Amino acid sequence: MSLIDNAVKSSLSGRIPIIIFVMSLLLGVFALNQTPREEEPQITVPMLDIYVSAPNVEAPEVARLVTQPLEKLLAQLVGVEHIYSTTQTNSTVVTLRFEVGHNREQAILDTYAKLNSYQHTMASVIKSWQIRPVEVDDVPIVMLGLYSKDPQLYGDYELTRFANEIANNLQRIEHTSEVKVISGRTRTLTINLNASALAAHQTTVNDVFYALSVSNQLTQVGSVVDGQQQIELQAGDVLRSQSAVEQLVVNVVNGKSVYLLDVANVIDGPSEAKHYQWLAQSANQQHLPMVTLSVAKQTGTNAVAVANDVHQMMTQLTRTLLPTEVSYAVLRDYGQTADEKVNNLTSSLVFAVFTVVIFVGVFLGWRPAVVVGLAVPICYGITLSLDFAFGYTINRVTLFALILSLGLLVDDPITGIDNISRFLNKKGDKKQQIVGAMSEIRSALLMSTLTIMVAFIPLAFITGMMGPYMAPMAFNVPVSVMVSTIVAFFVTPWLAMKLLKPDNEQPSELAPKVGAYQRILSPLLVSKGRAKLVLWLTLALFIISAMLPVMRLVPLKLLPFDNKNELQVLIDMPEGTNLERTAAFTKQIQTLTWQLNEVSEIAAYVGQPSSMDFNGMVRGYYRRDAASLAELRVLLVDKSERDHQSHGVVMRLREQLAMLATDGIVIKVVEVPPGPPVLSTLVAEVYRDAFVDEQTHSHAAQQLAARLQQEPHVVEVDTSMVAPSPLQRFVTNKTKAALSAVSTQNIAQTLSIASQGESVGVLYVSNETEPVDIKLQLPYSERNQLSQLIALQVRGDRDLAKTSNEFGLSSAPRPLVSLSELGEFTQHHVAKTIVRKDQRDVIYVMAELNGRTPAEVIADVNADLNVSNDEFVKTSWVGRHFFNNGGTAPWQLPQGTHVSFSGEGEWRITIDVFRDMGIAFAFALSAIFIILRVQTQSASLSLIIMSAIPLTVIGIMPGFWLLNQFGERSIAGAPEPVLFTATAMIGMIALAGIVVRNSLILVEFINQARGQGMAIKEALVAAGTVRMRPVLLTAGTTLLGNLVITLDPVFSGLAIAIIFGIVASTLFSLFVVPLVYYLVFASTEDKAHAG
């Protein structure tokens, strides 16, 4: 007896199975409660934004002097995948994106070290630089909208003060990271200067600024010793009240003090609005003032626990801090969605287990069903405990991996229990019969387990963001299958000995099945010609099935669309649009959005970004803080109450808002991606050669954008180009300014204070959670008129002009001069923003797709490039295929410009993932072949066993095509097909291991029958007859286990592929494998008989 046979025999005593059962349950319960929960697997993508200030330098010079040298320097860092930059006048932002999984702390340390080490080489125009890390744990898991039911009583100013107090309390919750307030107006001491009063009192803006700056100081100046006591010394004092500020002397004219109150109006209260937030809870309550609280969690902590703690504290704070007119809405709760997803999938898992056990009970009886059913919690308990040990979280992919593995992990116990049942019907010692039954299928079970493991393990080596997303699948399925094999050898036999009883009579319902199998297979074995005909027909079916994606009858896409309870609407007004105009247009968008029945709440943000999500982190939405930008966060009713999934809602909303996207306005409806986010679904990167000018570069991007707008069902076409916005520049007459002893710096500071305002310190008051800024400015009505700005007076600088006297030179008097005498405003345009990627100038052309896939759109657009009008033939997109691309409209690119679609869009990830999965599939097939070759000692037998793998395509592709012929396949005039996605590809890879298992055991039985002296045809029929029941049972359990996955919008592709693939492969392999075996080995047997 082998070592395994001895171990099986020892396990029949009951000690080992009981230990395994008890320990697995205890470990499983512990892991289920202690393992952190989240909705999606965390994808670690370290990103660093480096903000560089270069005052007084135009954008082209900033790019040349600052951005390009910085890019070259930072490209030397280890682990940097891409370098992006956005350069504007006076500043640049360089973004480093490191490779997925790169250590965040190491990335920050390396970047700081590199910048500091080469600081001596940086351009002198650089004033300062700052590194701001961005990572997935910065994404808030809870987002609360604090709103007022009575806007007259509590506005955004009061709400901000409440929110700051709440944030201080929330920060004390264990495992929280950043608690942030996206505030409204804050408490500010605003000093509105009176230009007329300033002139009357011969005082300038800079006089007031200087007086405030030097007066608001309290300095430690040392200490004195008085006897035996040391006394600290301080000098000065700080401003502590509005009255103290008002009574501040800002100038002395002719011996008379000029107080701030004489030349300005001082207001202690809300600052001026720089952005707006509001909450709409119904069509009647559309503009409730709101501020937002966001809470992020620490790395590796449980999102569910942290979110629950936040809600508990908010319940307490609502009672103690908030008046009845103030409440809050939950705008995001990843803890709740994670817990809901985990609980729903756990219920689905329990249902799947119950269904599989019932199925086994119907065909094998309740005793075998109990044996198989008890194997499931053992496998899951050990698998979950290993998840906890290796740092995996319980998330959607983890649970889908467990559901997928259900059909696989019961295969070994089913195979074992079926064979034990057959052996128990023979005469002999019960223990010996059980050991003999397991010994007969020992090698087949071990080899089949290895084949499934090697089919899934390569998924762990997928590169990019999809790697960590699919990592739980690559870990959990092999582990659970391996554990199921251990259970099959050490637990199932003991349970079978306790529960199963010999039954000399075979179940009557098997007779017609056995007869049917013989009646079908035997005629096919009459001659080699018939067998070959069947194989040729099977090959034809395979080719036809494989051609369906090529003919675009089965659309290919990386990831399907998820079904979330939220979406975003991004609004980009023309550059230079003021805040009020943006807010008014945002309200128009909101009114149209409310017409969708699925909308429950809308949170609006104008002039500032909302709390970012992972999609927004990658796309850079957290930098959308201009007056011309706005967004709506649209919350939908629960998915159980909607007719359409969120993608369908997005398509309808796009159609509804499209009519407002005119005159340079860009409106984008953004849905939460189910996996790795990209800049946009379709992204083209337009590059230029070294000597191609900017105008030609821009023209190329415009040509491409115009072509995409003509393509059917391509929507929301946009570019990264920014239209020039107007600029008024005060040009100083240097001669006049010098004669008046006025410097350009003096003029600039005066205009800066008057126009945008300047902070001149803080007001030191008690009981404030945030500093109270003192802001100096002109009133709103005056600072927005150039005539008022140019009328301001400036005083000559000290020592800038001299007069001669009998003693030499002395400082000339400092005259008061109006700005209108020193220069004038001239009309210009703001320099264009320069966007670069990986040290090359780039213009992004972005678009979204309604019902079409990136592959077909890119193929059609590329096919029409550089086609002359004479050669062009217009065709409908519906009838196109990948042998006949294009036909919408011809287009041209200027010479020296190039387009790449494989950059920041979904197509890049699609190429990488399907490439990696193709390599993984090839590796899996090679590994399976090697395992089979070692086991069978025959290359022919190995290939015969693997012949079942391509048969899965005969089921998968027609299955997807068939599903596209039924149901609602269009929304808002756009197609809504069932997509063959990356998860469906995983299903194909999984099937390679599943079907090989059945074929392997079938061939093992054929060889055993021939070894007992049967003729080859008799052995084929006999082995198929014996193996048909367990083969159909394992196929049935796999099918039933995956039925619940079809309800998930993301992983339904995996389930569809497995269901259709297992049905086709099982039916075909029961006949194709014997026929191939017959054709290969029949001649060998004939020669042996002839000899």
Image: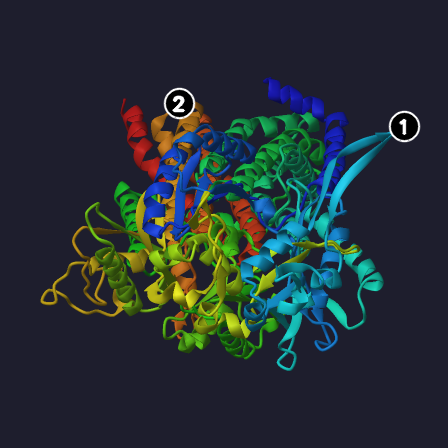
Which residue is most to the bottom?
284
Residue ID for mark 2: 937
Q: Which mark is residue 227?
A: 1
The three-letter amino acid code for the residue at tag 2 is: Gln
Residue 930 location (% of width, % of height): 40, 27
User: Which mark is in front, 1 or 2?
Assistant: 1
Comparing 510 with 491, the one in front is 491
Comparing 665 with 165, the one in front is 165
Badge 1 or badge 2: first in the primary sequence? 1
Above or below, comparing residue 81 to residue 536 in the picture? above
Comparing 350 with 1, the one in front is 350
Q: Residue at x 42, y 77 (%)?
A: 660
The three-letter amino acid code for the residue at tag 1 is: Gly
Residue 347 location (% of width, % of height): 68, 54
Q: Residue at x 69, y 59 (%)?
A: 248
Residue 959 location (% of width, % of height): 42, 58
Kind of element beneath mark 2: loop
Q: Quadrant of residue 698?
A: bottom left
Which residue is most to the front?
806
Total count of labels: 2
Horizontally, is 436 left or right of 1057 in the view?
Answer: right
Q: Quadrant of residue 481?
A: top right
Above or below, comparing residue 940 to residue 519 in the picture? above
